[in-house]
Image (cartoon, rainbow, N blue to C red):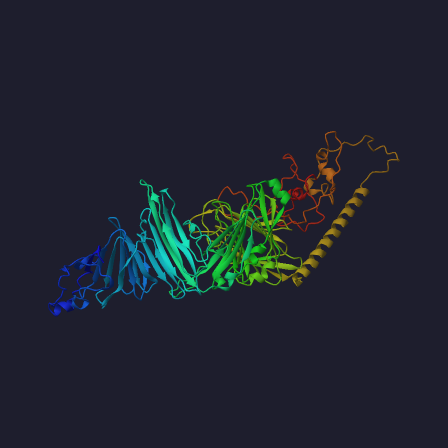
Amino acid sequence: MAGLNCRVTVGLLGVLLLGAARLARGWETYEIALPHGSNITVLIKPGAPTLPANQYCMSGPCPFGEVHLQPSMSVLPTLNRTFIWDVKANKNIGLELQFSLPRLRQIGLGESCPDGVTHSISSRVDTKMVRIGTFCSNGTVSRIKMQEGVKMALALPWFHNRKVSGFSITNQLSIKRLCIIESVFEGEGSATLMSANYPDGFPEDELMTWQFIIPAHLRASVSFLHFSVSNCVKKEERVEYCIPGSTTNPEVFRLKDKQPGNIAGNFNLSLQGCDQDAQNPGILRLQFQVLVQHPQNESNKTYVVDLSNEQATSLTIEQRPSKLSRKFVPGCFVCLDSRTCSTNLTLTAGSKHKISFLCDDLTRLWINAEKTISCLDHQYCHRKKSYSLQVPWYILQLPVQLHDFSWKLLVPKDSISLALVPAQKLQQHTHERVCNTSFSYLVASAVPGQDLYFGSFCSGGSIEQIQVKQNVSVTLRTSAPSFQQEASRQSLTVSFVPHFKEEGVFTVTLDTKSKVYLRTPNWDKGLPSLTSVSWNISVPQDQVACLTFLKERTGVVCQTGRAFMIIQEQRAHTEEIFSLEEEVLPKPSFRYHSFWVNISNCSPMSKKQLDLLFWVSLTPRTMDLTVIILTVVGGGALLLFALGLIICFVKKNRKKKINKGPAVGIYNGNVNTQVPMQPKTFQKRRKDNESHVYAEIDDTMVYGHLLQDSKGSFLQPKVDTYRPFQGPTGDCPPSPPRICSRAPTAKLTKDEPSSGFLSESESEPYTFSYPNDRNISNGNTDPPLLETYESMEPGE
């Protein structure tokens, strides 16, 4: 065509592959025949792997039609070769490269083609060259239209015996844009395409278009994989779609918007740049994917997700993690209002949403949702009292499986704590007893900076309640599709309770059918430093509990502080304290009453974390023959001892009566009529007589001076006689002792000797005889006054 000057340069790219075997055959001679008047220049020289080793230059008229390889491949040395066609044209002239089968597939910078055959295509913008892209074989790109010239480089490896270029050049009218790339789909498949100069910046204020040819029976969806925008001073960067049947063509979208999906028929996509800031231009670039597949049955169904009455709630439908496959995998999209489709979709509170699915297999998707429940006013918390944590119906009606639903519970610091009560008792997930239900609850701290995971729990256990000190996250996680049918079983109530010091308290009611496995929070990482956790374990009256620890020692090494475990019988009110750093953990032991297990951590040294696993099992309570014999013998001995005391008292009283003088009514001159003075001291010491022994003492006799009011009158106490402690300690877990030294710690009891109410001047303390001594342990005969006052209700 007149007015067109075409310059075609052909070169060879690579290293001279002259191996030792080739050199052994000696030098080879090649005869290269060049057409007369072609102005082809052949340059042969060694070069680096990325630089031309041999280069051929040719100029002449534009080679419209099929482009041939010149010189012929048969006359060239067996080296890596690169053929370059540099076609220059007027600014108003459009050129079109047409590719025969197989079509081209675009690759990113630094990627390579499997067969080593690479097509590099560039265009001109004034005096600058713009890289349109690098392509391999076996793709969807059939034509590329450019304006103002084109530069095409075909790289062939030395072992590839190709005889044709595989493309042709035709003349086109002005396209008034940088380029147009046509992508043809014969059936299901996908194509990844990039903007010009990718990953560098798209030319300023330019326009680039992709045309997609889609079979009528298929549907196409567009997904943006990577993009960035520049700093515009004029216009706005955008993408425009021309979609068949649309009433608003072109449909304009920002790059950050969800892109169209479920498109039937051929469509165009254009990228429009802007005038950039000269000082800080930024980078406009785009990499996207077009996926073509058969329409799905679910694409005709619309689901309504009503979040208009929800607060602080978000719902995301996204792809499940899956293994990569080299085979074609149909897309799986979520569509908002049937047109805006993407691989994931997030719905926020305050609106009603209509969604549909374009997916061959809905099991490839799942739902993750989160709701925040804040109670920052402690007075409001007490009025509200409780919340029910249940998965909402609008999630259960969707055809996609729920993966996670998380409730973040926030309460005022140091004033309110939380209690989680399940509809069905829970079991803790351990390696010894794995949760195999369709859903479970994951409980973790929601305090910023605190890494505390209480554990995973599922129904079918013995845990009735989980109390946490402060903010907590409760996540319902499903593990089987059957959750949709079992969703009615999930119910968890959170209540606001007075603040307590332990990080967590677990209430456990033992089951006679199976063992209960329990382990400390943060099992994999170890209990956090200076953290205390308690278990309140209830034992039925007709059962005996066996407490067993997995390890003999914890292995924890404290850097600061001490690590303790306290086991407290609630009825006997006795405590056993163990140093977790120094002592061996207790052997399996039987517990006849409900008891506490409290574990308090120190600040451990690195790699020496505290983690404990223990289990509790029940056996029926039976009367041992030895116990019966000891009880009978002990009862008989007590009876004989009581009879002996009675006889002794009777004899002494009778002796005193015999030693008395004559009756007062009879005069006796030898008798002193004055009242005898009381001696200053007993003839016998107190410990030798029984004047201080009482079968029962009235509280007003001992504590009378304490019961007087300000006017001197006596107050009437509610309890008129001493009653030893007989009941449980209540809901408060035991607290670790205050240790000031690192001396070895022995097993202790909480019933420490009391100083009583006697002054230091009393050299002979009173002795009390108890009507019921079954709660006195370790031979301690001191009155448990501390226990008596602890068991009193306020105001008593």
As drawn, 435 above or below 369: below
Residue 127 point in image, percent of width and height: 24, 48
Specify the quadrant that holds the C terminus: top right
* Residue 577 seen in the current view: no
* Outermost residue, front side: 2
Whether residue 678 sits left or right of residue 782 in the image: it is right
* Residue 158 seen in the current view: yes
* Outermost residue, bottom side: 25
Residue 516 point in image, percent of width and height: 57, 59
Q: How many marks?
A: 0
Instruction: Please state which of residues 744 and 578 is positioned toward the viewer in this rendering.
Output: 578
Residue 77 point in image, percent of width and height: 16, 66
Whether residue 594 sits left or right of residue 43 in the image: it is right
As drawn, 600 above or below 516: above
Residue 434 point in image, percent of width and height: 52, 61
As drawn, 530 above or below 543: above
Whether residue 237 sits left or right of residue 346 in the image: it is left
Instruction: Please state which of residues 439 and 796 is positioned toward the viewer in this rendering.
Output: 439
Specify the quadrant that holds the N terminus: bottom left
Instruction: Please state which of residues 640 and 532 is positioned toward the viewer in this rendering.
Output: 532
As drawn, 502 above or below 368: above
Q: Residue at x 15, y 61 (%)?
A: 38
